[in-house]
Amino acid sequence: MAAGIHGRLIAVLQELRRIPDVLAVALARRDGLLIAHVLPKSMDPKRIAAMAASIVGTSEMAAGEMGLGPFFQSIVDSGSAKMLATGAGEEGILITIVRTDANMGLVLLSVGKAVQAVSNLLEEAAVEPEARA
Amino acid sequence: MLDDRLGGGFPRTSTLLLFSDKPTEKRVFAENFVVEGARHQETVLYVDFYRMPSLARAELSRFGRFPQDRLVFVDAISAQLMVESAEAYHVDRIDSLADTVDVIVRAIQEERPSRVVIDSMEFLSDRFPRDALLDQWRRIIAEAKAAGSVVCFLFINWTYQERDLGAIRALSDFVLEFQSSMRGGIVRNSMRISQMAEGGVRTNWIPYTFKDLIGVTVYFPRLMVTGPFNAGKSTVVKALCEKSVSIDRMGTTVAFDYGNVNITGIEAEIFGTPGQERFEFIFQIFAREVSGVLLVVDATRPEDFERAKHMLALIGPHIPYVVLANKSDLPGALKPEAVAGQMDLPDGTPVVATVATESKGVRDALLILAEMIIGVR
Ligand SMILES: Nc1nc2c(ncn2[C@@H]2O[C@H](COP(=O)(O)OP(=O)(O)O)[C@@H](O)[C@H]2O)c(=O)[nH]1
Ligand SMILES: [Mg+2]
């Protein structure tokens, strides 16, 4: 059952990965463990999952502290790419890396869809992380 | 806390030299010193060469309320400005060293203050010959001793050679050196206390800060709380700090814990790290300018002790640390000595049994760490 969910999660990530200018996609748990990824070999998926969890944890806390309303997404805007860390349900973080000149309208729409699909799947079953640290 | 280590503060009839490269940093310490005396209903004497006493009084209101009538001024400024002084003690002939010191001596003899501040000696060293000044310096010390006062000389040296400075230090019981440095736009003030007597205490550089209404406190801009996962780090930060934030998700600290503590003359910013390996990158962000470390271990899990030592190493070498043998309430918890043994800690490393969930032992550990950082332990 859990294995089935894992396959379906990967499918969602892969679909998002196919959008033009999307370079890499991963799914992490809020405590920084990796759930699934379609990242290039040059990236360390576990480290990225942990860092995304720190970014989201800190952003969410900051949003609360400043009274900004419910947290949705953190964007790390850098020289050649952007990283979007988007809350996916209670437990997930969807990490999407896109080219810096990407069509953000299309990207955000696709990320929104993927987040919805991921949240549903995560709710369906308590997913075991890929590996325990 | 410092006071305790110096045997209940600076003993009566001692001579302090407050020495620095900038004027304002040490004055606040001297002001704090007289205000504290006044708060104890003691008479205190402030000799001011630079400010009108009315201005000085206004500035001292930053310290909050204290009995103003206990604070007596020697006005050594009005004569410079050629205005009438409103103070009982005022220097009329500011161009005469002997006359100036006569007024100070008379004030000491008549008021018998518990504390005297001379703000400051470079005013005199700039204007009068060295040997004559040193004679008068000794005279003030002798009079202060006779009156049972602690006398505190502020002094910025820009004229004297090391040899003369040595003579001035030798006149003093304690030398307090002040330093301030700027790093990344943040000013850090620190001071170091040396007891001049043979085998006297010599502290490390102690960072300090000034706060309105509170005064001068020891200030550690960064203490780290680290240790293995689930040892109780976040609980320790909560126990120490009135208000704290923990960026925790699903029972795990994913970024850091942060809180500010304020206890008995110490203020510190406390940063807790996550415990798991996957968050080690956090250390690169926070493990800078760390004054000291509280290393938290679960005393029932010796299998995590190696990990604890690794985390300590991540923060850096030569940083003072205290080990908290936490969860000492649980059955099978190792005693501090056993923890020290199993961790193979260097001799003398403090290990404190704690129950973070009940705030037990946590403060003691912090105070021990503070003493280690300051260098009085
Ligand atoms: N019995 C006991 N439990 C503790 C103590 N300190 C912390 N805990 C519990 O240990 C768990 C982990 O604590 P936490 O502070 O989150 O650990 P961290 O991972 O090191 O930050 C929590 O359930 C705490 O309530 C203690 O002194 N005694
Ligand atoms: Mg924690």
Image (cartoon, coloured by chain):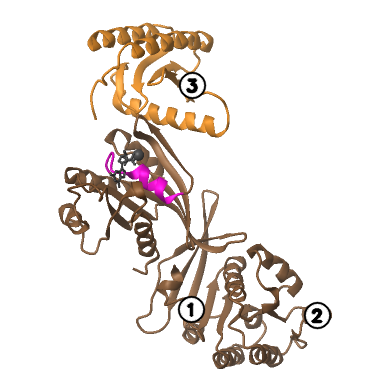
Chain colours: A orange, B brown
Give the mark, 2 or 1, whose residue is nearer the N terminus: 1
Percent across and percent down for residue A129 are 27, 21
Magenta stretch containing residue B235, yes or no?
yes
Q: Which residue is mark 2?
A: B86
Q: Nearer the viewer, residue B220 or B137?
A: B220
Which three-letter amino acid code belongs to the residue tagged 1? Answer: Phe
Note whether residue B52 is visible: no
Percent across and percent down for residue B64 are: 65, 64
Magenta residues? B228-241
Position of the C terminus of chain B, as image quadrant, is: bottom left
Residue at point 51% right, 48% down? Answer: B184
Foreground disc of the pair 1, 3: 1
Disc number for residue B10 = 1
In the image, residue B3 sits, relative to residue A37, either above or below, namely: below
Same chain assignment for discs 1 and 3: no
Q: For mark 3, what is the residue?
A: A73
Report how far apart the C-alphas of labels 2 and 1 lie in the structure: 32 Å
What x and y, as percent, mark residue B118? 62, 80
Occupied quadrant, residue B69: bottom right
Let me know if residue A14 is in the magenta part: no
The residue depicted at 34 percent of the width and 44 percent of the height is: B233
Counting the numbered discs, the total is 3
Residue at 50% from the left image edge and 20% from the top image edge: A72
Question: Is B328 left, or right, of B33 in this rendering?
Answer: left
Q: Are marks 2 and 3 in contact (CB under 8 Å)?
A: no
Q: Is the distance from the Cβ of mark 2 to the nearest ligand 1 atom less than 8 Å?
A: no
Q: Quadrant of residue B257?
A: top left
Using residue B153 as the reference point, say whether residue B258 is left or right of it.
left
Q: Quadrant of the N terminus of chain B?
A: bottom left
Protein chain holding label 2 = B
